[in-house]
Structures are given as C-alpha cells and as structure tokens.
Amino acid sequence: MMRRQVELFFTALMFYTRIPCPKWVGHSEENLNKSTIYFPVVGWIVGGAAAGVYWGLHFLFPLEVALLLSMVASILLTGAFHEDGFADVCDGFGGGWTKLRILEIMKDSRLGTYGVTGLGLMLTLRFLALKAVISTPGLPAWHVVPVLVVAHALSRATALSFIYTHEYARENEDSKSKPIAKKISAADFGIGLLLGLLPLLAYSAWLRNWWLLLVLLPLGLVKTYLARYFTRWIGGYTGDCLGATQQVAEVVVYLFLCSRLWNYT
C-alpha cells in the first residue's frame, strides 16, 4: 500500500515537474489519473524550491532581483507547464468563437497575441504582488517564504477541484492532459484538498491568525467564475484550463495578502 502511494507521488512529480524520478516508476494512464491527489504536494515542492532560491539569493542581491530569480526557478522546475496552459487559454478563448475553434486554437503549439499579452501581464502582476507582500510594513523579508508554499499548494488544489466537479471537454484522445482529466472519487478529492490546505493551516497556526483562511473566499469565486466561463464556451475544461486556473489562483493568493483591505497587524 505504501509503495503504491510512493509510486503515485513520483508519477505526479514526473508529470508536473522536470525533477528526475526513480527509474522504477513506470508510466500508465491509470497511475497518472490516480496521482492527481498529489498535485498539491507538487505545489509544496515547487513553492518550497522557489522560496529556497529567494531566501538564499536575498543575501546576495536586492530583494526584487532575488524574487524574480525565484520565479525563474519555479518556471524552470515545471518546464513552464502551467504558464503554457494559461497562454493557450488566452489564445483559445480570445480568438475562438465556437467550441471547436477554441479547442483547435488551444491545441496549436504556436503562441498568439492574446497568449503573449496575457502571459506577460500575468507574470508582471505576480511579481508586483509578491514584491508588495515583501514590502508589507512590520513583516520581515522572509515572510514571502511560507507565502510561496501556501500559494503554490492552494492554487493546485483549486485546479484539482475541476476534475472532481466538472467534465472534460475534449472528445478525442490526443490531448496531452487527457490521462489526468477523468473523474476522481470523493475520497481522493478530499485527500487532495486537505493536502492543498495543510500549508495554509500551518501558516495560520504559526502566525496565530486564522483570518488568513479568508483567502479561500476569493479562490472560491475564481473557481466558480472560471467553471461557468469554461462550461459556457466549451462544455467543461481541458488540461490547459487547469493550468490557467492554477496560474490565476496563485496570483489571487498574492493579491489577497498584499491588498490594502487586508490588515496584517
């Protein structure tokens, strides 16, 4: 039983990142589908790596430079997997007016104007929001370290929820994310959701500030809006939609924490 879970974890790590995995970890659609419960745990790792890069480099460089390099590290670690999904969604929904056309554009490997513009704005917003978190009065610069782990885990849990609540939109089998797009059980979804919430719960307990849980409200709104939008246009979601959801949810966490509506003191 334990070996099976370890295999599923490494399967998720192998699919969602470029981190080398043991050679005995095989590839199968069944394992890839079941491994989605560890999607938030991948967020722990990617967020932790970004936080480690930031923490190590902030001794050598200005905070802004260290922050930007931490973003570069997270993108290299995932191979820009989710950023690619976000850009494809911008192109597809920006340039398509029917389900077939939207799906066709998102499948195209070429990047269009909507994708370039959306990706550039999203990365800029992520950087500025994180910079604002670092600049929060009364908090040390290392405060962004746990924030990165929380945001990466919560954003992936938000994306994971689509697989439980909605249907996959493509009718063919040639999508790069088809193996992870099948329904998951309520038990698996509950485990995945808990894994996504654990960093937030630990962070709230550490600060002794349970008001941080309010970040779940804007994340719920993001999920609701995107779910309705995707369903309206293509009847469900695709792998690119999951990537776009992760990117938007991550930025929403940073925006919540740097918002003037939020009182840190």
Image: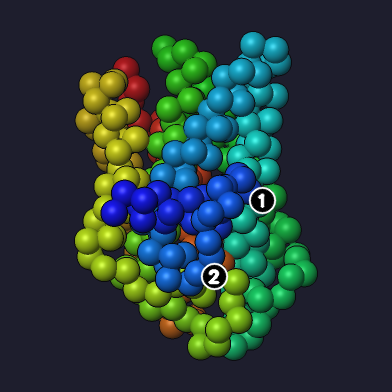
Mark 1 residue type: Gly
**Is 216 situated left or right of 229 in this image?**
left
Give the residue drawn at x 51%, y 16%: 141
Amino acid carrying mark 2 in the image? Ser
Looking at the image, residue 87 sits to the left or right of residue 220; the answer is right
Q: Which residue is mark 1?
A: 79
Residue 247 position in % (x across, y down): 53, 52
Q: Is residue 18 left or right of residue 241?
A: right
Screen quadrant of the N terminus: bottom left
Q: Is residue 216 above or below residue 95?
A: above
Rendered image quadrant of residue 59: top right
Nearest the viewer among 147 and 76 is 76
- The disc at residue 177 is 2
Asked which quadrant contains residue 63, the reply is: top right
Q: Residue at x 68, y 38 (%)?
A: 72
Q: Who's the residue at 73% across and 58% down the image?
A: 116
x and y percentages locating residue 197 in the rendered image = 30, 43
Up the image or down, 139 lies above or below 237; here it is above
Q: Secondary structure at mark 2?
A: loop
In the displayed structure image, the side of residue 191 where residue 33 appears, left or right: right
Mark 1 crowd level (few <14, some 14–19, many ≥20, 10 Å Cα): some
Q: Residues within 10 Å of mark 2 (few under 14, many from 20)?
A: some
Whether residue 265 is visible to the viewer of this picture, yes or no, is yes
Give the Cα separation between the discs numbered 1 and 2.
15 Å
Q: Nearer the viewer, residue 150 or 121?
A: 150
Q: Position of residue 34 (x, y in %)?
A: 38, 64
> Residue placed at 51% from the left, 88% from the top?
171
| 64, 163: nearer the viewer | 163
Q: Position of residue 211 (x, y in %)?
A: 24, 32
| Secondary structure of the residue carrying numbered label 1 | loop
